[in-house]
Image (cartoon, grey):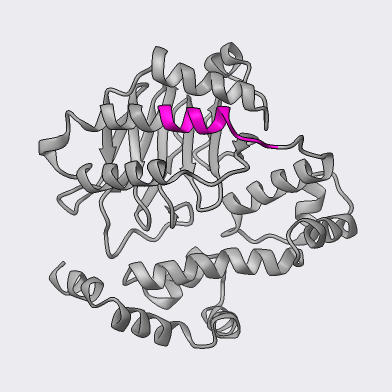
Amino acid sequence: MCEIGKKLQLTHLKRDSFLRLLDFLTTSLPPRRVVTAAPMCNPPVHEHLELYPHPVFDLPLSGVKMMTFCDPAGQCRTERFLPGDVFQLPPATWKLPRWTHAHEMACLVLQKNFIRITYVDITAPTGTRPLCNTFFHTAQPPSKEIRQLAELLARIGLDDDHAGVTPDLFRALLHLVRHALANDCAPEIPKARMTFLKIRNYLLENFTAELSREEVARKFHLNSSYLSRLFHEQEGCSFSAFLIRLRLERAAMLLRETDLLADEIADSCGYRSTTFFSAAFKHVYGIPPGRYRCECSRRNPSRQADRTTE
């Protein structure tokens, strides 16, 4: 663990240590600027491209963080982010992190059912995405005020007239998250649950790669049969069903939000065969990917209008 992580004594799944992290972000490293990614109908095809249905905020703690994203002018650009900078990723907007410089980073993720705060330290950059092993999940979902403030930040983040206001708004968001975390009634996490959360986090970050139950079990020093039992007990489904769900949820979002071709989407979601991808998608959603995209466009004509004007 790097300098800031050691100083704050950040510990996986320990609420008190993440409260210290939030205090550090509001007092010792207050936000000085907020950079917001803009939607782009055709993001670059890359296996490490990240696109989420929920708000994400990246906060460098030390070193230099390189990030590729779409700017308000619709141009793809790569920028350096330093401590005090905030990179905001609104829902259904892509980013491509560059793991090329040593740095520490915190990430605030406003999931539908919980708030996720992560810490990543890159001491020896390899250019590939690292595994996040230090994080905390709240037991409660984000409050209405947190969601509304995140939505406001997303709306005004692309407007130059409000560039001086967004750091103050984000500081307010941090205070709300800190209050939510301090009052979160999370029970003590059993060992089996903690093991499952680590594996689940690994899959969330690596589901586009070729993964097998046996490979993941070996990585976490588990028996593959125990891994299967763990998923049935904790998630109510098999390991493979969970992995397929992650891949197809991403595929559905790419079909709704981009104009990427089916083979590009298949590859970016971990499928090496477009035919197999189409069959898996139809099995889960009841219709082929192309028809799903057409029906989504009919239900959201404003999105279709955006595409025709880009």
Residue at the spot 19% in from the left edge and 51% down from the top edge: 75
Judged left or right of residue 235, residue 300 is left
Residue 31 within the segment the image draws in magenta: no
Residue nearest the viewer, comparing 172 with 263: 172
Judged left or right of residue 292, residue 237 is right
Residue nearest the viewer, comparing 192 with 103: 192
Judged left or right of residue 144, residue 70 is left
Q: Quadrant of residue 52?
A: bottom left
Q: Quadrant of the N terminus?
A: top right
Q: Position of residue 166 (x, y in %)?
A: 24, 33
Residue nearest the viewer, comparing 90 with 215: 90
Q: Position of residue 231 (x, y in %)?
A: 78, 59
Q: Which residues are magenta?
A: 175-186
Determine whether 187 is above or below 39 in the image.
above
Q: Quadrant of residue 255?
A: bottom left
Residue 180 within the segment the image draws in magenta: yes
Determine whether 23 is above or below 180 in the image.
above
Q: Position of residue 195 (x, y in %)?
A: 78, 43
Residue at the spot 54% in from the left edge and 70% down from the top edge: 248
Residue at the spot 16% in from the left edge and 67% down from the top edge: 310
